[in-house]
Structure formats: structure tokens, C-alpha cells
Image (cartoon, coloured by chain):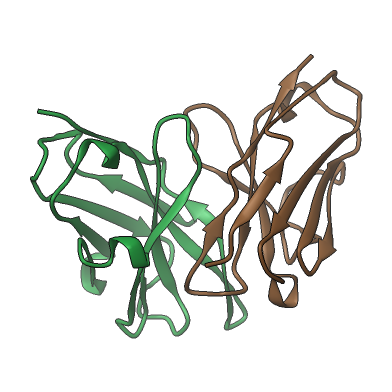
Chain colours: A brown, B green
Amino acid sequence: EIVLTQSPGTLSLSPGERATLSCRASQSVISKYLAWYQQKPGQAPRLLIYGASSRATGIPDRFSGSGSGRDFTLTISRLEPEDFAVYYCQQYGSSPWLTFGGGTKLEIK
Amino acid sequence: QVTLRESGPALVKPTQTLKLTCSFSGFSLSTSGMCVSWIRQPPGKALEWLARIDWDDDKYYRKSLKTRLTVSKDTSKNQVVLTMTNMDPVDTATYYCARRHCSGGVCYDYFDYWGQGTLVTVSS
């Protein structure tokens, strides 16, 4: 099983700042099959990024993904108030054995 | 418009069997490549993939829970059912069903549509 480790666990930033979230895999994720989701309290996760760097439909361009192999990054260029949430990465390279990271909570400083 | 909705008991007792139903619309599970997965999330914790059923009735289970899980589908009713036996308090979680992304006949195992989730509490 591919284990995904997200860091930091909690990130405290102010609106307008840049957020950088990390997701490290225990082994290489083939073909950049890595997705990112945003989850707000009481809601289901929302797909942000797939294929490590492709934005899902309707996702603002302040969200960007990068990385390959074992290391992946989600960047939010200028934080808006609605961006404060929990973010999860998910690998699908070892389909059907899918795994999620432990999450990064992005909170308002 | 694609929608999914989970339904089932909110409370089960330890050792009981849980049965959850995912009712969906806007796509067909008979379409080649289409799959529906179950994912759970204990309160305040991370997401955990549990099981998947494919258009051709192939089934996959989380290895650590394989002996307790069964997934089935009723294509005519647009429903997927998850059964989990021998429930324990550690199984308390919100259970989601979600659809894999398919476009132009090509499918990938990330989830573009999710149900709203159903909270299941295991307690005597």
C-alpha cells in the first residue's frame, strides 16, 4: 500500500498569503496519478486537482498542483476566506488500491 | 446532472451488520469503465477507501477489511449497496459513496462526484 504523508498538519496563514501544502508518497506514484481535494466542515470532499497538476472543472486558477515521483505540492497563490479548509491528497496510481493522505488543515491566522 | 446519495441506519450496535445504500442518478453503472467506491471518514480523521464495484461487476476491497465487506449493485435501480459485518465502535464514521471520473470513455480513479455522506455511529 502506498502511504501518503501530508505536511504540515496545520498551516496558519492570513488571507492574501500564499499557501504551500506537501504530500509525500512512500513509493513513486506512477504517471503522476495524484489528486487533491478540499473539504469544509460537514461537507463531502471537493476535487481540486487531478493528474498532479490539472485543475478540475470550476476550480479557480489560484489553485495549482505540481510534483512527480514521490513529492507533490498544492499551492494556493493568494488565500481567499473561503479557502480555509482541510486538504487531502489521494493517489490512484495503484488502482484499485487507493490511498489518501492524513490531511492538512489550513486555518486563519 | 450527476448526484449520489447514501442512506442507512444512523446507529448500529456492536457486532451487528451495517447495510448502506448509494442511490445515484446522471450516469449508469452499466457504462464501460464506470465504477462506484465507498469511502469513510471517522470523526476528525482522514478519508479511507473501503471498496469499489465496477460496471462489469468486478469488486475490490480494502485488504484489512476484506473479510467484513461486501459490495453489490442493482443497475436497474441505480443503486450500490455496501454491507459491513461485525461492526465495532471504531467503525463509527461518515460513509461516502463516490464516482470515479470518466470522460470520453477513459476513466481514472479520482472522484469527481461524491454523496453528502451518512454518519454511522456504533454504540450499544
Relative to B32, say whether A99 is above or below: above
Q: Is residue A47 visible?
A: yes
Relative to A58, say whether B67 is above or below: below
Q: Quadrant of residue B101?
A: bottom right
Relative side of B55 to B18, left or right: right
Relative to A105, say whether B33 is above or below: below
- Which residue is outermost to the front? A26
Relative side of B117 to B120, left or right: right
Q: Residue at x 45, y 85 (%)?
A: B32
Q: Position of residue A53 (x, y in %)?
A: 81, 61
Q: Quadrant of residue A92?
A: bottom right
Q: Quadrant of residue B8?
A: top left
Relative to A62, say whether B51 is above or below: below
Relative side of A55 to B30, left or right: right
Quarter of the image where the C terminus of chain B is located: top left
Q: Position of residue A107 (x, y in %)?
A: 71, 21
Q: Residue at x 91, y 26 (%)?
A: A17
- Report the front residue among B18 and A97: A97
Q: Position of residue B64 (x, y in %)?
A: 33, 62
Relative side of A16 to A95, left or right: right
- Which residue is outermost to the top? A109
Q: Residue at x 70, y 76 (%)?
A: A30
